[in-house]
Structure formats: structure tokens, C-alpha cells
Amino acid sequence: DLAGARTRYAFDLAGARTRRDQQRGAMAAARRRTILALDCDCFYAQCEVRRDASLEGKPVGVRQKMLVITSNYAARAHGIKKGDSLAEVKRKCPDIVIKDGEDISHYTEVSNAWRAYVDKYFANTCAVERLGLDE
């Protein structure tokens, strides 16, 4: 039946147009949306250097329990990785300064100050989400 075929064809075209328009709208919305990720690399180690300027340029690691949970770039240049044991870290880099990271109150304080700074400049214009102490 030719009339039925025309109706089905017109319906299929209308559906395709609707889907295409929806896709175009979603793509346009995605182009207007901007996501900016701020991640402070080596955050705990950076906090320790900021707290004690004599550590500047020296290999610094931060430990929790018996593992190094982060290190700065000077330490990483010696092959130090997150999760390395203290014994392994000392073997790889005998001159590394190990700071105790069990009490995270200082890191939380620095993180809150950083968050306040970001909120001051961006919270009125866009949503700001927090993922962790350093993000």
C-alpha cells in the first residue's frame, strides 16, 4: 500500500529529525560547558616544603604508616614512587627527607585556603566541586 509506505516513511523522517535535533542540542550544550580540573601535584610534599623553606630543592617524601604516600619531583627523580616502603626509599635516595604525614590537619588547612581562593574567583560564575584535599 503506497499511502501506508508514505506515512511510515514520513514518520521515520520525523523521528530521525527529532533525534538529530536532540543530538545537535546536546553537542551545543557540551561546547558551552567547560570543565577545569585543578590538581595540586605532590600536594603533601609541597605543603611540607611550604612549611619549611629549607627543604626547597631537596628530595622530600611524606610517609603514613611505613609507606611513602607522596614525594616531590626531586625525590621522584631518584625513582621514588607512591607506596614505596621506607627501606626502599632510603635505598633509592639516602638523602631524602621523610616527613610524617599521619596528622593531616596542616594539609587540610592548606587545602581549605586553596578552596577558598578558588571559590572567591569561580563560585559565582560556575559550579565548583571538590574531589579530595588536593583537587
Image (spheres, helix red, strand yellow):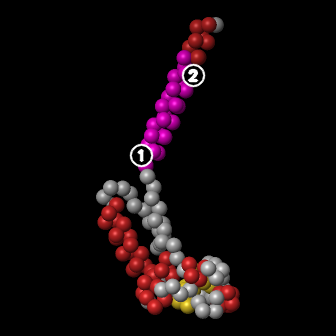
- Magenta region's main secondary structure? helix
If you read the primary sequence from the N terminus, does the residue marked by circle 2 or circle 1 appear first? Answer: 2
Count residues near mark 1 (Cα–Cα under 10 Å), then give few for <14, some for 14-19, many for 20+.
Answer: few
Residue beneath the point at 64% across and 92% down? 94
Residue that numbered label 2 is attached to: 12
Classify the position of the N terminus by image quarter. Answer: top right
Would you say residue 69 is visible in this rendering?
no
What secondary structure is found at the residue carrying circle 1? helix
Which disc number belongs to residue 77? none
* On screen, residue 64 above or below 42: below
Q: Nearer the viewer, residue 50 or 4?
A: 50
The percent position of residue 47, horizontal first and vertical second, equals 45, 82
Considering every residue shown, the one lying at the far top of the view is 2
Q: Where is residue 107? Give x, y as percent.
A: 45, 80
CA separation, marks 2 and 1?
30 Å
Determine the residue located farthest toward the front in the rendered image: 57
Residue at image mark 1? 32
Residue 52: image x %, image y %? 44, 89
Please name the residue shown 66% across and 80% down the image. Answer: 79
Q: Amino acid at mark 1?
A: Arg
Which sits in the foreground, 15 or 51?
51
Specify the segment rendered in magenta.
Answer: 10-33
Which residue is drawn at the image coordinates 48% and 71% (left, top)?
A: 40
Q: Is residue 17 magenta-colored?
A: yes
